[in-house]
Image (spheres, rainbow, N blue to C red):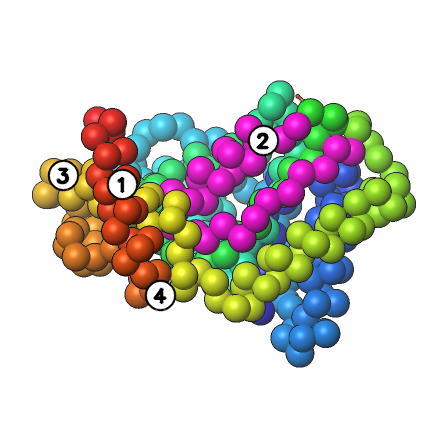
Amino acid sequence: MKILTLMSSFRKHGNTAHVVELFHQELKSLGEQNGEPVEIEMLQVGHMDLGLCRGCRACFDLGEEKCPLQDELLAVKDKILAADGILAASPLYVDDVNGIMKNLIDRLAHVCHRPQFAGKTVYLLATSGGSPAGHTLRTLSTAWLTWGAHLAGSASFMTGAKMPPDEISERYQEKIARSAGKFFRAVNQERYKNPSFINLVVFRTQQRAWSNAPQDSLDYQYWKKQGWTDAQCSYYIPHQAGILKTGPAKGVGWFLSLFMG
Ligand SMILES: Cc1cc2nc3c(=O)[nH]c(=O)nc-3n(C[C@H](O)[C@H](O)[C@H](O)COP(=O)(O)O)c2cc1C
């Protein structure tokens, strides 16, 4: 099992790094117990060569390889594509992800137009001083769901300004073990093959929006080439969801697409 962690705190030994480290330990021991070795790569996003999105739209209109920044973004994307599971972890800054994580999300905005992460399972982590992290986790889940990923779950941890690793472990070991177990099982059992209702709704909403895009646009051509503009197509990849889920998802997706420009 290949896990990629995208950790956006600039502090290499801060709260988020410690929570992530405990999460990794749990994943490794679950791998050993289940005879499924877990290979983990962690990217400390803030220490990579990733420029700020300038909003030039080259990725949308010409293709992501035409981004003028020519930095490590496409390498990050290749690593996501090569992983089975992605752990996305951010500290909370003013009730949202930090700027480093938001920039990564913005740099991957073309994946909202041309979703490529179906088949990937993601788990979301946030640490905060003391605030609830609902909005932060929603920012992360909105991005990953729009990119087509399967959301295994999320968890947040109140760690103050700087909590000693022992205290993090003492307070949160059980919660981290539960969360890692959920993530491990979702990846191990390939639950992405049975997409959630929300995954199906997102697909249908996008399907209506991109099917109506100009036919010479990159986005339309991408959707057409995948076979996703066909109204019979209910998801990015072959799946096991039944009609009781796909039927209502089609209706809700159609309804929501009415609110999109
Ligand atoms: C610029 C900045 C803004 C922050 N805003 C909040 C906030 O709005 N609410 C909160 O509970 N904690 C806030 N915090 C605290 C961090 O979320 C918390 O200490 C987090 O665990 C830091 O993770 P790190 O050690 O991995 O960087 C903020 C910290 C910084 C540096």
> Which of marks 4 and 3 precedes in the sequence?
3
Whole-angstrom CA distance, mark 2 to mark 1, is: 24 Å
Which mark, residue 240? Answer: 4
Give the position of the N terminus as an image quadrant: bottom right
Q: Is residue 86 magenta?
A: no
Ligand 1 closer than 8 Å to label 1 CB: no
Amino acid residing under circle 2: Gly
Q: Which residue is mark 3?
A: 212
Whole-angstrom CA distance, mark 2 to mark 3, is: 33 Å
Which mark, residue 253? Answer: 1
**Image point 78% across, 42% down: which residue?**
13
Q: Residues within 10 Å of mark 3 (few under 14, many from 20)?
A: few
Q: Nearer the viewer, mark 3 or mark 4?
A: 4
Q: Quadrant of residue 162?
A: top right
Residue 254 x %, y %: 22, 39
Range of the magenta residues?
132-159
Amino acid residing under circle 4: Gln
Q: Residues within 10 Å of mark 2 (few under 14, many from 20)?
A: some
Whole-angstrom CA distance, mark 4 to mark 2, is: 30 Å
